[in-house]
Image: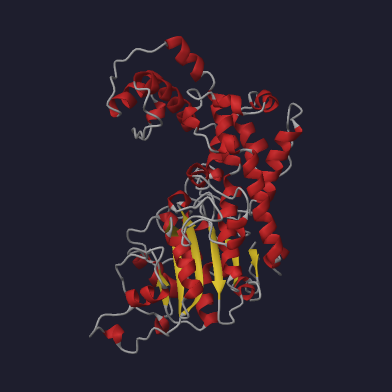
Amino acid sequence: MALPETHQWPFEQQKQRAADIVHLLSLYTNILDSYVIEFFSENLWELVPCSWRETLSDLKAPQLSMLLLEQGPCAGRQSVWPLSLLAYRAAAHALAFPRQPREACSPPPHVPSGAGPGGQEFRADCSHSPRISRLFCKHVKPKKQHEIQRLGAVREPSHRGRLVKKLCDSTGCERVVDIGSGQTADGQEAWGPEPARILLPRHVVGRVDPGATWQDLVRLLEPEEGSPEREGWGWCQPFVLTGLHACGDLGPAALRLFAHCPSARGITAVSCCYMKASASSSSCSGPADSGYPMSAWVRALPGHALPYKLRETACHAIEDYAGRLRVQHTGLRVHCYRAVLETIVRRLRPSVRRPALQLARNAHLLPFDDYARAGLRRLGLDPETRWDTALVQSMLGQEGKVIAYFCLNLLLAPAIETLILLDRLIYLQEQGIECALLPLFEPRFSPRNFVLVGAKAGGRVRDLLRPEEGAPSGQAQGSRGREV
């Protein structure tokens, strides 16, 4: 089966989508750049258009999931929605890359929909995937196992589990450089159970600086004098770069090293923690090695800046939260609890804004008074403080509004992530490199589920992503690099 036409998106269409997302975000910056824990202390509900408030106030948690966060027809409404709210929803869904892999997996029976592990591989044993040897599963959590077997394992019958292997074959590489891998099984499992081709992994400790040159990377990889790996080593030996959840600036740094290093023939990059990446806000300022924007196109767009809050929103797990809304999970009240507590904290110490607060995992199950006293104690404030009980109860009664406000932010999370990933995709295309984005992992299990695939030296990304005979096709977004 042929790949969807989106895999052949023209370069100009990719750039236009980025521009459209920037414009959409600029219309709602006041809502997106706010924190739900300040819902009461900053009166955030007033930021929402009046007609939207009337509609959202009447929605229950399952309706917020079905009618707002989930894609598809907005059916089942019990009132007429404002056109502006319908347009907001439609634009958010239309501009975001599709997140669901074609080979969708359902969560195991003991896991609620929208929460926790997913995938057929964990139905028999929730802690071990049978698609990966137990030798490589020690100290590797199920989520990581799911990602490893889809990214690099040979034994997976579809193209999704052979991506790194096929990229190596296509580009003529026998070496894989796994950036940011720690000491997990990524490198071992990339080659799978073909004994004749297994290359023993070598763990290199070093820092990949965002401003590092490709020569710095090659020197870091160079084996020590006298080691067996030293024999036959040379900087010109080709390799494939891979990074599974490269955090912050590590993802952009890997892309720049790939683009400039002659020995790097291919890359598979899965990024995370966008808020930890460096960012510039002007087309005329900011470091050239910033994590966002990377591309000249996005850098030139007026209003392209993504404040910390928006980049943090891009990391949220929309499928998980939608699942919690559907089942009306008790954890939904945590935002309201924290927002009410914020008003108490500010009354006691006006100079404190959004202090970090870590309580017991199920603190939201406590009565609010107990939750608040535990929070005040953790913040070093008087836990015996008295507050206006009537006012607190009034705020707690607005939990539905707090949830709705959070959903308005969360709805645009996939579009913000799409802009960040598009910027990286366009950057590689500006270097003349063929590349594509593929939703590789089950998003309910691994929310940062996009892998950016790039190939040089004649490797065709389209051929790499083509399913083998009998395997279902996937969804990919990308195009050939610009002719330079």
Q: How many marks?
A: 0
Point out the image quarter for the C terminus.
Answer: bottom right
Asked which quadrant contains residue 196, the reply is bottom left
Q: Is residue 164 above or below residue 80?
A: below
User: Residue 200: horizontal and vertical position, in percent?
Assistant: 34, 78
Asked which quadrant contains residue 254, the reply is bottom left
Q: Residue at x 45, y 69 (%)?
A: 242
Q: Residue at x 42, y 25 (%)?
A: 342
Residue placed farthest to the bottom in the image? 232
Please say whether residue 145 is visible from this viewpoint.
no
Q: Is residue 209 above or below residue 236?
A: above
Judge from the rendering whether residue 362 lies leftward or rightward of residue 305; answer left or right.
Answer: left
Looking at the picture, tell me which residue is in the foreground, 384 or 419. 419
Asked which quadrant contains residue 450, the reply is bottom right
Q: Residue at x 66, y 75 (%)?
A: 483
Please say whether residue 419 is visible from this viewpoint.
yes
Q: Is residue 31 above or below residue 283?
A: above
User: Residue 22: horizontal and vertical position, in percent?
Assistant: 63, 49
Q: Residue at x 39, y 22 (%)?
A: 346
Judge from the rendering whether residue 271 lies leftward or rightward of residue 72; answer left or right.
Answer: left
Judge from the rendering whether residue 50 lies leftward or rightward of residue 169; answer left or right.
Answer: right
Q: Is residue 170 above or below residue 38?
A: below
User: Residue 213: horizontal and vertical position, in percent?
Assistant: 41, 72
Point out the image quarter for the N terminus.
Answer: bottom right
User: Residue 50: horizontal and vertical position, in percent?
Assistant: 67, 24
Residue placed farthest to the front in the image? 284
Residue placed farthest to the left in the image? 226
Q: How is the image coloured?
A: secondary structure
